[in-house]
Amino acid sequence: MSFALFAEIFSVIAPLVVLAGAGWLWAARGKPFQIDQISLLVTNFGTPCLVIHALLAAEVDRSMIGTMALATLSAMVAFMAINAAVLRLMKLSVRDYVAGLTFPNAGNAGLSLSLFAYGQPGLALGIIFFAVSSLGNFTIGQSILAGRGNLAAVLRSPMIYAVLIGVAGNLLQLQPPVWVMRSLQTAGGIAIPLMLFTLGVSLATLKVNGLTRGLLLSALRLLAGLGAGFGLSWLLGLEGVARGVFIIQCAMPVAVVNYIFAVRYSRDPQTMASLVVISTLLSFATLPALLALVLG
């Protein structure tokens, strides 16, 4: 690995590790942190502003918006099929684990890496992946765990409308007043730091239970994500920034929201907590290799 590539990889990983590490240290020292309120602020205010600003400001090939959405949908279908098959072979509950293994942490970790690695164009494409994945998790994923759909909750999510506004504005080449864009940029600026800090707090507070199962399923999440990311990017002809962002997002660990869903519907939350912690630690450990593959 050349020094230039090493320096580039370090510059991408360092902010993620520093901010998540600060959150872990904060929680480990017993400092107060209202994770539910902060998550609500990020989800319903910071992230929608980030989404709208990034999509309006991004200078990306507009055809890539639809291509990234299609690629993400294809990845979710592939993940669901692979994970269901492996879980059946392991004689584990498909209903308990398939959603958590299918929908990765495309927000806290994925958006951060997309931004740090590729700048605003990477963030805009990462947001498309995040939006499609989140929509799938809040509909199909949550329905699998609950045994019923929850369309009303999806329609109440500000994220859906933020994506619609951002994509429509990008396609129509709208240019809002400077004060609007700066307000969106400032408000959206809280999202990624708080996402990473909250991720660190979660890692410090969630407990690992069933180490062997956690390691096996975490490895499944990362390896299936990496394999599908490379395979689908080749099949769909993704190149450059789109290819790198897609592979990064596919290879992300289990998302914290999957633990929240598991608690809500009593679907083995202890194991899901273990998957969040173990897969995230494995992901952090393998990030240099992942970034070397997509940036090299």
Image: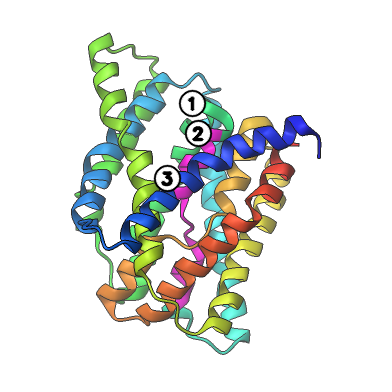
| Magenta stretch holds residue 173 | no
Mark 1 element type: helix
**In this orientation, does residue 248 appear?**
yes
Circle 3 packing at 10 Å, graded few (<14), some (14-19), many (20+), is many
Residue flagged by tag 2: what amino acid is it? Leu
Circle 1 packing at 10 Å, graded few (<14), some (14-19), many (20+), is some
Q: Which residue is mark 2?
A: 115
Residue flagged by tag 1: what amino acid is it? Gln
Q: Give the residue at x 47% y 49%.
A: 109
**In this rendering, is residue 54 above or below 155?**
above
> Mark 1 or 3, which is nearer the eye?
3
**In this rendering, is residue 193 above or below 30?**
above
Looking at the rendering, the stretch of residues picked out in magenta corresponds to 97-116
Q: Residue furthest bottom?
A: 91
Q: Give the residue at x 59% y 63%.
A: 282
Q: Which residue is mark 3?
A: 19
Q: Which residue is mark 1?
A: 120
Q: CA distance from mark 1 to mark 3?
A: 20 Å
The answer to which of marks 1 and 3 sits earlier in the sequence is 3
Horizontal placement of 268 versus 125: left or right? left
In the picture, residue 50 is in which quadrant? top left
Q: CA distance from mark 2 to mark 3?
A: 14 Å
- In which quadrant is the C terminus drawn? top right
Mark 2 element type: helix
Q: Residue furthest front?
A: 29
Horizontal placement of 24 versus 275: left or right? left
> Mark 2 or 3, which is nearer the eye?
3
Q: Position of residue 170 (x, y in %)?
A: 40, 22
The answer to which of marks 1 and 2 sits earlier in the sequence is 2
- In which quadrant is the N terminus drawn? top right
What secondary structure is the stretch in magenta mostly built from? helix
